[in-house]
Structures are given as C-alpha cells and as structure tokens.
Image: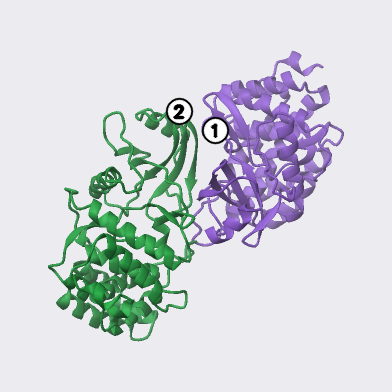
Chain colours: A purple, B green
Amino acid sequence: MAVYTDVTTEDLVPFLACYDIGALLAYKGIAEGVENSNFLLHTSRGYFILTLYERRVAERDLPFFLALMEHLASRGITCPQPVKNRAGSTLGRLAGRPAAIVTFLDGVWVRRPSAAHCAALGEALARLHLAGADFPMRRENALSVTGWRALYAGCGERADEVQRDLKTTLAAELDELECSWPRGLPQGVIHADLFPDNVFFLGDKLSGLIDFYFACTDTLVYDVAICLNAWCFEVDHSYNVTKGRALLANYARIRPLSAPEWRKLPLLARGAALRFLLTRLVDWLNVPPGALVRPKDPREYLRKLRFHQKVKSVQDYGVDHGATKP
Amino acid sequence: MAVYTDVTTEDLVPFLACYDIGALLAYKGIAEGVENSNFLLHTSRGYFILTLYERRVAERDLPFFLALMEHLASRGITCPQPVKNRAGSTLGRLAGRPAAIVTFLDGVWVRRPSAAHCAALGEALARLHLAGADFPMRRENALSVTGWRALYAGCGERADEVQRDLKTTLAAELDELECSWPRGLPQGVIHADLFPDNVFFLGDKLSGLIDFYFACTDTLVYDVAICLNAWCFEVDHSYNVTKGRALLANYARIRPLSAPEWRKLPLLARGAALRFLLTRLVDWLNVPPGALVRPKDPREYLRKLRFHQKVKSVQDYGVDHGATKP
C-alpha cells in the first residue's frame, strides 16, 4: 500500500497534454498495489488510473502487459483499457518512470468470496483464456516451475525460522514437482495472479479483472490451479468443496478441460501452492526493519500445499466424476 | 501518506446503506494525509471522500470540524461538504473509527505557488474569515502560544542534535512571545493550517479549501501570519516580497486589517514560524525507526523565524505604508 513516486501538478499537466483526455481536474495517489505507484485521475473527460511503473516491474515487459489489456478489452473482457497518447503509444514517461493511463473500472473486491463469487470467477477465467487464444505476443512465466529453485535458493536456508522442517518440505516438493511437472497441456495467456483483490464485483455480478502485471504464457489449467488456491479455502485453511465445485464447473462449462488437464490439476495445484509459499517466504524473511506493511504469512500456503499433497484425484476438489471425461 | 485502517466491502456496504448517496460502485484508499484514513468513494450518485478519524484527531472535536465545513459551505466557501446520513448526522462509525463522508472537490494543489496564487489565497483566506464570523461553536487553539511551552518541553533538550544552539534560540523566543503575544486583536474561526497542499486550484483559479482539522477560534491575523510563512518563501528560504504583497493586499482588500493588526503581524509571523518549528522538531526527533515517511526538516522554519525576527515593520513584508493606515 504505497505511492513510491510523487507526481507534481507541474509535471502531470504537460504529460497529460500528450493525451486527448481533457483538462486535469484532480488526482489522488491510491494506497493500493505494492509494485507500482497508482493515481486516480479526474479530467474533463472522465476518470482514469495513472500508473508509474517502479523497479519491480521490468520495463521490457510493459509492452506485453499493455497490449494484452488492449487485446482482451477488444475481445469483450472487462479490464482496464490502456489509453493511447497523441503519438499512438500507450506507454509514456513521467517523473523518471515508465507511465501509462488506463480507464477506470467500477467494482469492489470481495474479502470473503461466496460459492456464487467462485462460480463467476470460474466463468470469467475461462473467458479470459479463450479471449487470449489469438494474442500474438509471448512472455515466459518466471515464477513457474523453472523459477522456483532460484527462489528456494534465496530462502531455503532460513525457512526453518518460519516453521520447523520447512526447508526439508520445500526441497522434497521442489524435487518432485520438477520431475513430474506436465509439459504438454494446452498453453496460452494466463493471468497468474487472479486473487480476490484483482477481481471486481458489483453486487454478485463480476464487473472486471485488473492487474495483469504477472500475466504470461503458460499452461492454462495452471491458472485454474492458482485460483483454486486463492478462492476456495476458508479462513481456517480448510478447503471448501462447494466453492471448488462452483469454480471448476463454471470454468469447464465455458472452456471444457481435457482428461489430461483434469488429471494433472492436483499436481498443478501443489505447484501453485509452492509458488506462493516461496514468494511469501522470501518477502517474509526480507522485511526491511520498521516496514509499515507486514508481509503475508507464508504458512497459509504450506497448509494449502499439504491439502493438495493428500488429494487423490480431482474428485476431491468437488468435481463430478462424469465431468472429467471429455 | 497512509491508510491506517482497512475498510472491507462487507463493512462499507451496510455503512453506506445509512446514507442516501446511492449504491457503491468503487472505492480506493488515498495515499494522502498523515492524520486520518481517506477513501475515494464512487457511488451511483457521484464521487465522495470517506474519512476514518484516527487517534491523532480528538473525537470530541469532530462535531466542530464537521459543523464548520457545513457552515462555510452554506456561506459560499468552496470546501468539502459533510453528507448527512438518514438519521441527520454527519458523523458515523466504521471499522471501529469515527467516520464521515464529504463531497469530492475538484482541483490540484500547487507545489511552487506564484504571486498570482498567493493573491488568490489572500482573498480566499479573508472570505473564509468573514464567512466564519457568525459560526456559533468555539474550539481553543491547542497549538497557539499557550501550547508551545509543552511542545518545547518535549523536544528542547534534544534540539541541539538538529542545529547548534537551537535550544537557546527556542527558549529565548518562547519567553519573548509569551510576554508580548497580542491578546486584544479580532478573533474568529481560523483554518490554522492553510498550506499549499490544502488549497486547490484549477488553472490559476482557486477552486477550494480542504482539511479543516486544525481549525479553531483564534486571532484572525495569526492565520494570515501562518500563510505568509507557508506561501511566501522560496525554496532557498528567502522571503519573496512580491508574493507577500500579493497575499496581504488581496486579504486586506476583502477584510481590511486594523492598524493594531498590521502592527502585530511581524510578531504573529514569528509565532507562526515557532509553532511549525516546534511541531516539526517533535516529529523529527520522534521518527519511528525504519519509517517510510521522512518528516519535514524543522530548520526550514528556523530560517523563517530568523527572517521575521529581523523585520522592522510590516513594510518589510511588501505592504505599502498607506495600506496599514485604516
């Protein structure tokens, strides 16, 4: 929750003059997002979000993210739409940072998603995957299986400070996932971070998807596995089979999963749990002294990992046996 | 720059149901203000600011602040207008905090005010003082002369860590101001914190005043002295006589100052400089380790204090001799 870069009116006015979005009426720094600095803009033409990309986002990836949002919006996905400047570009520079303006999206995120929210999420995720099918750009997923060993190298030695025997658990899981990670499943654009705070609702209706800054080209059903982790566990860390069924059934209704995709889902769910366990562990062990933001507890994802390790088949996620036969 | 209290959709929706401002469409925490948590609300009826009052603002003072904004708005001052809930109250409770909704005000604040901005500020300040004349509530100024000794007690011993001989300077100034502080000048509602970040402009036109959470009943021309300090010095700490003249002349055009008010202005300007020197010094010496926000340098106000100490008469501020004769 931070604005890292101060933007002065004196800098913003000439920047906005390069866009056809009217005169500046107001702007406020938004206390959301940990990667970038975001500002809500009010101009005589409406409301927009201005993002200044800070160093955690690689500048070379920005054209992928911005083009993806444009592509998805043109395919009917409700997501922020990058605004082109007068030179036809969606990417500019402001206060020494790469900067972009996107449309403002109404909606609020839900802290405790219901099964109905999970159903809507499943459908939206499938539609996102279909809409991304003809997106021509590629971006490797640096946070998939090939990236985990480097993360582990940066936190494994100190893992037991967080939980006894965590280092051993991580090492064994990593070995196993590296060997058995599926390679031949359908690939495409995945969001890769579709947590509840990136999904807007108006009432029970899903109104939009945001924050495409982890999006990449990867196994589609891995994105489903990430969402199972992020949406279908309760506060007490128990898996909610009703929510899981709602998410999976509504995804498969829009984009049917093949038998191999169903079969590999438990393994991919373990991978997704390991990915967030590792990144949270790195953040947890590297909190600057006195930081105002407390990082998220990695042990939440250890518990989820243990659940997935015990899953025998996709039926344990609440899916009807019949649904898994194409 | 912080949001101290997280507000969930689940808490916000029932809170808003007590107001006649339509359905919630979106809300974002605003990274501005250091005293309270502020959110921008979008509802089907428009845009609003939701404020949760944190512990630095005394709950007993909130009725004064909210009633003042209502009063000023009804007298034609452009400032945030508190929105009444269905029970007719402007003050509610949300997430365990006192909370209020005010109207959203367009405008941006100017980092480097010009003489034209200072002129507009002078006029707006005078109109604020006139509009407050019949406001029936009173609130003592805890940060005026009677409050400074307590501030000094909390930072004087360590003052020399910031600047050599600062403790001696503060003690002598405090003694002198306590003896000579004027008591009989016209009193009324003052803003008491009308720095550039609390004054909105659209182009060169002043569009509104915000942040009335230091407002109180005090000597009116002391508010002018605060603004002289906050608006009329350059980045190199030199006093800009053109800006001072613009501020003072435009104030006096709307609310003429009496001869005693003009005469006491240099002394009040010293007091205003001492007030911000002391509060900045307290903040500077009490930074929590690792805090993300660096406090403002108190020495800026030491330099301003020294300027005011050398002022012989109000003419040194750029005022024509004739203007000071009623």
Q: Which residue lies furthest to the top in this view?
A: A322
In this rendering, is residue A4 above or below B162?
A: above
Q: Residue at x 61, y 61 (%)?
A: A95
Q: Quadrant of residue A188?
A: top right
In this rendered view, identify the residue nearer to me: A242 or B63.
Answer: B63
Numbered disc 2: secondary structure: loop
Q: Which residue lies furthest to the front in this view?
A: B322
Give the image location of residue A262, x and y in percent: 77, 25
Q: Residue furthest left?
A: B184
Give the image location of residue B310, x and y in percent: 30, 85
In this rendered view, identify the residue nearer to me: A65 or B318.
Answer: B318
Q: Mark 2 points at which residue?
A: B23
Chain ID at mark 2: B
Give the image location of residue B170, x and y in percent: 28, 79
Is disc 1 surrounded by few (<14), some (14 to 19) or many (20+) residues within 10 Å? many
In this rendered view, identify the residue nearer to me: B257 or A40.
Answer: B257
Looking at the rendered image, the quarter that the C terminus of chain B falls into is bottom left
Give the image location of residue A28, x and y in percent: 50, 50
Amino acid type, callout 2: Ala
Q: Which residue is drawn at 36% across and 45% down?
A: B80
